[in-house]
Amino acid sequence: MKVAKDLVAASATPMVLGILAEGESYGYAILKRINELSGGELDWTEGLLYPLLHRLERLGHVESSWQSVTGERRRKYYRVTDKGLTELAEQRRQWDTVMDALKEIWHDRVPLTVNPLEGLA
Amino acid sequence: MTAENGRELEAQFAQWRQYVLRRKELQPVDADELEDHLRGSVDELVAVGLSPDEAFLVAVKRMGSLDELSREFAREHSERLWKQLVLTADTGSEVADTRSRRDLWAMVACAAGAVVSVKVPALFGLSFEDDGSFYARNFTLFALPWLAAFLAWRRNARRPLIAALVALFALGAVAANAYSLSDKSQSIVVTSIHLPIALWLVVGLAYVADDWRSFRRRMDFIRFTGEWLIYLVLMALGGGVLSAFLFNTFRAIGILPQEFISHWLVPCGAAAAFVVAGWLVEAKQSVVENIAPVLTRLFTPLFTAALLAFLVAVVLTSNGIDLDREALILFDLLLVVVLALLLYSLSARDPLAPPGPFDKLQLALVVSALAIDVLVLLEITGRITEYGGTPYKAAALGENVILLVNLAWSAWLLLTFIRRRTPFASLERWQTGYLPVYAGWAWIVVLVFPPLFGYV
């Protein structure tokens, strides 16, 4: 099972902000962390991550700095700002609402199974 | 990882980086960031036992296609597709940055020089109102030497060339001011028109400094001329809007700034614009699509239709062309426009492309212009034999002959090119080889005509 693209895109911002709230990080590590958290079910690409990080930076939710790691290699680290934390709190409130509603609907019901022949009857 | 492997891997990274940088959506900082990502991925794969080569391939594959990546980047950074001409372009490369910054300062210095030159005569009591004809004759002498200086500086012109430039501008100054011509004489009008042409071709000499015989460089100068003119017109429009706002806002508080506008803003702005336009063309060359060829494409069919309609009307009504002073200029200008249309489509054409319908259209344009020119020439020679020569008619006649020769031979070359007998380059060579003829004629008019016609 792979999570649908729309859902990945919708959850991208709180996901990245949430990871950065744990501490500053860089692109490759963020992607790895997402993989880890979702057991590889979330299909993130570099094309999704980096433009998103740049957008969050433009909006002032994160800030970045270049730091040198081993030898000549430089790495761009991102860190969440206060504005980003406010945004994260807001997004979290919205996601909680959505998840609570979904849980309410699904609560105590038998797991939905689809009878492939039902539509034909 | 052995040293050999490491070197190979580095080479692969370098190559990958080059691919990334070819996309204008991805800038050097993005390439840095993505490269770090790729390296992280490679390191991890090597750690689980892949060889560096394999790890690189897998990592690149995981990153997905660059097309998709740059599309995503373009969505966030759509401005990158537009804003390409920045005053001092931050290209990410140190050398190019210092170069463009030095260019900027040289341009500012030259523009300032032009502004000062315009105002220097005022120190000697020459005002715009009373000595209007002095300024009209000399205006290009204030601005163009500075543009030439900027270009010569950019190209590290050698001393002999600099000396030649200085000498030619000095000669221009002599031609404009040595003869005592009355303000209402025809000669002064003729000089005011031809001196800018002569001086512009001196600028051309500075432009092609490194290799003035090369017809490619001369073609570059023709391109430069077109773009320069367009920038100048755009800046003039902007200047007009600025002046209008300045005048009206100050008038609203009871101050009339017309003295400032007409004595300072307009002349100084125009002189500076000459240099700034040159700098803009140099800076944006190859960054933004050239606009002159685009205009040419749009207007060649329209002008062809207009000229053909005119010829048909002349034939149907059998009206002779009534050549008063304005009409003389008009027909000369018409030929200049036709020549410009021809030149700027030449300048944008791929020399190796086979002849197409547009070339035929151009032939039609040139032939109809030729037919009109013959009519005009007949009229002028008739007038000269009837009333005797004046500087005005002689200059107009000379221009007509020069343009006629040029267009006639161009038409012939176009025809043979369309019939695939001559390569396109011969047409290019003909046009660029003809540039000195214009220069020669313009200098003759400004230097020889006044004494020849007794300073009338």
Image (cartoon, grey):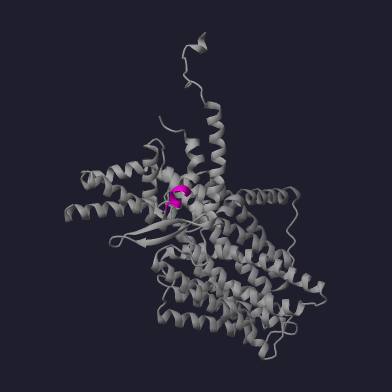
Residue A19 lies in magenta, yes or no?
A: yes
Task: Please state which of residues B201 and B117 is positioned toward the viewer in this rendering.
Answer: B117
Res. B289 in view: no
Image coordinates of residue B391 in percent, x first then y, are 67, 75
Image coordinates of residue B211 in percent, x first then y, are 40, 70
Q: In the image, what residue occupies the spot 55% across and 45% down?
A: A91
Image coordinates of residue B114 in percent, x first then y, are 58, 79
- Toward which corner of the image does residue B128 lie, by quadrant? bottom right
Count up the numbered dots. 0
Span colored in magenta: A17-22
Say above or below: B366 vs A115: below
Q: In the image, what residue occupies the spot 43% across and 42% down?
A: B68
Q: In the image, what residue occupies the spot 75% across and 61% down?
A: B322
Q: In the image, what residue occupies the spot 48% across and 20% down?
A: A110
Q: Main secondary structure of the magenta part?
A: helix
Q: Quadrant of the N terminus of chain A?
A: top left
Residue B29 as seen in the image, left or right of residue B244: left
Say above or below: A33 vs B346: above
Task: Please state which of residues B24 and B239 is positioned toward the viewer in this rendering.
Answer: B24
Residue B67 lies in magenta, yes or no?
A: no
Image coordinates of residue B179 in percent, x first then y, are 64, 86
Task: Please state which of residues B451 and A73 is positioned toward the viewer in this rendering.
Answer: A73
Task: Please state which of residues B24 and B202 is positioned toward the viewer in this rendering.
Answer: B24
Residue occupying the far bottom of the picture: B124
